Image: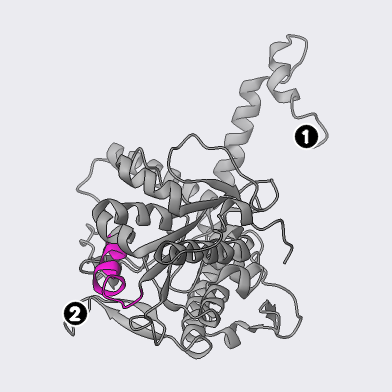
């Protein structure tokens, strides 16, 4: 009856005395319709159970020869909106797939990259929470150079830059595997940090609810009515958010000793592994929050870092030398030894202006934050090669020294 009336009619007509419709009538009609809705019946239209496949095969997905995740029957990319109007369920399904991807990347680190898992803390007891990192076979014994990879914050674990890219783009763009394989080809030892594995989740025991009184007769009628109204509003709000979702398990987070934050983890891995490695040249790639963790490492271990690290390639780092209170000597060192490839519409390696007095910033050739590591891949290894060449020239006379700025790579498509 009212569907053909303009949307502004009900809001404006009550101001005109010549129109019989009134604003109060419309409101009462709306409330009457609401009162007729059986919310309990609507809420029986439950979302599906939050039980999802445990393997890629059960999800019916696999990675093709190009490293792209595809449905094994249709060949289509991953579909997030698997069920209409069930965003929470779709998100939980996506997260379940993400956990499988994490395990798949671990397997690739061990099988394709021949890396080994090292448990943290190194003196962990049998029952305490643990984390781990990955090391190449020569990570601690390579006398020449060591590459250290530090990812950003969030759900990503060892071997990943961005889980979203692995699922929606391909393995190369979202994982650290291209960096690892190229580093090994060029004679680096490799350490892959795992800065977001900070705690063990333990399910809390279910709470027993108190027995209600049989008929609620111990409560005044007026109080029961107010409670019923409140419950009805809660039900309505609950349903409007999503259809009767299953209650999620409650968990307690037990921190991992000396690894309870990305910053703490970075310092721990430096102290227990990087500083004790044989390599005279340490080179670091730090993405997003990994850049902040590196700056914190510099603040805490300034002399050690300066003596071992030859270059740091940051990709869209979120560090802030003012908020982190980095000293003048750190800023001067970063100007000479760091470069930050930031998200930008400019071509790859184009200088980008900055207000911070820390390190040079250049374009990563993309405006997508999560893609900055992959798009700057070739430029980063050229940056490292130049830094190592400059270091060799300090140790012995050179006829010419190739500077970082004169050899920045031009825009490359890959």
Q: Which of these two is toward me, 257 or 10?
A: 257
How many C-alpha atoms fall within 10 Å of the one at disc 2: few (<14), some, or many (≥20)?
some
Q: Which residue is mark 2?
A: 124
Place of residue 409 in the rendered image (x, y in percent of width and height, measured from the top left): 66, 58
In the rendered view, tell whether residue 281 sits above or below residue 108: above
Left or right of 386: which side holds 250? left
Residue drawn at 40 percent across, 41 percent down: 229
Magenta-drawn stretch, dominant element (helix, strand or loop): helix
How many C-alpha atoms fall within 10 Å of the one at disc 1: few (<14), some, or many (≥20)?
few
Q: Are marks 2 and 1 in contact (CB under 8 Å)?
A: no
Place of residue 412 in the rendered image (x, y in percent of width and height, measured from the top left): 72, 61
Q: Which residue is mark 1?
A: 2
Residue drawn at 43 percent across, 86 percent down: 115
Place of residue 147 in the rendered image (x, y in percent of width and height, measured from the top left): 44, 71
In the rendered view, tell whether residue 273 sits above or below residue 393: below
Place of residue 60 in the rendered image (x, y in percent of width and height, measured from the top left): 64, 84
Lower position in the chain sequence, tag 2 or tag 1: 1
Q: What's drawn in magenta, residue-wise?
A: 264-279
Q: How many marks?
A: 2
- SS state under label 1: loop
In the rendered view, tell whether residue 253 sits above or below residue 330: below
């Amino acid at each position: 009856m009212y569907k053909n009336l303009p949307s502004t009619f009900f809001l404006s007509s009550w101001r005109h005395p010549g129109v019989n419709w009134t604003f109060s009538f419309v409101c009462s009609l709306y409330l009457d319709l609401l009162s007729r809705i059986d919310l309990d019946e609507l809420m029986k239209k439950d979302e599906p159970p939050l039980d999802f496949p445990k393997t890629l095969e059960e999800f019916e997905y696999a990675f093709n020869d190009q490293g792209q995740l595809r449905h094994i029957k249709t060949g289509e990319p991953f579909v997030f909106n698997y069920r209409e109007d069930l965003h929470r369920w779709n998100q939980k399904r996506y997260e379940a797939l993400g956990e499988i991807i994490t395990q798949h990347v671990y397997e690739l680190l061990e099988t394709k990259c021949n890396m080994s898992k090292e448990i943290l803390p190194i003196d962990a007891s049998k029952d305490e929470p643990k984390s781990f990192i990955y090391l190449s076979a020569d990570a601690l014994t390579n006398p020449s150079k060591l590459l250290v990879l530090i990812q950003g914050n969030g759900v990503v674990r060892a071997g990943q830059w961005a889980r979203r890219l692995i699922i929606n783009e391909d393995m190369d763009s979202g994982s650290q595997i291209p960096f690892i394989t190229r580093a090994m080809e060029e004679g680096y030892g490799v350490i892959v940090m795992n800065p977001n594995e900070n705690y063990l989740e333990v399910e809390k025991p279910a709470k027993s609810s108190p027995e209600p009184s049989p008929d609620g007769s111990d409560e005044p009628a007026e109080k029961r009515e107010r409670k019923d109204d409140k419950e009805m509003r809660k039900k309505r709000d609950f349903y409007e958010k999503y259809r009767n979702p299953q209650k999620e398990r409650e968990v307690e987070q037990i921190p991992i000793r000396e690894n309870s934050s990305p910053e703490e983890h970075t310092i721990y891995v430096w102290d227990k592994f990087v500083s004790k490695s044989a390599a005279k040249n340490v080179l670091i790639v730090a993405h997003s929050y990994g850049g902040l963790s590196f700056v914190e490492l510099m603040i805490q271990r300034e002399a050690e870092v300066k003596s071992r690290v030859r270059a740091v390639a940051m990709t869209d780092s979120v560090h802030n030398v003012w908020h982190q209170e980095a000293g003048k000597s750190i800023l001067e060192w970063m100007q000479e030894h760091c470069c930050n490839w930031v998200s930008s519409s400019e071509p790859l390696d184009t200088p980008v202006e900055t207000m911070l007095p820390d390190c040079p910033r250049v374009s990563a050739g993309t405006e997508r934050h999560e893609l900055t590591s992959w798009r700057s891949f070739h430029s980063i290894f050229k940056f490292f090669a130049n830094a190592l060449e400059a270091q060799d020239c300090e140790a012995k006379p050179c006829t010419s020294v190739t500077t970082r700025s004169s050899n920045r790579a031009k825009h490359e498509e890959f």
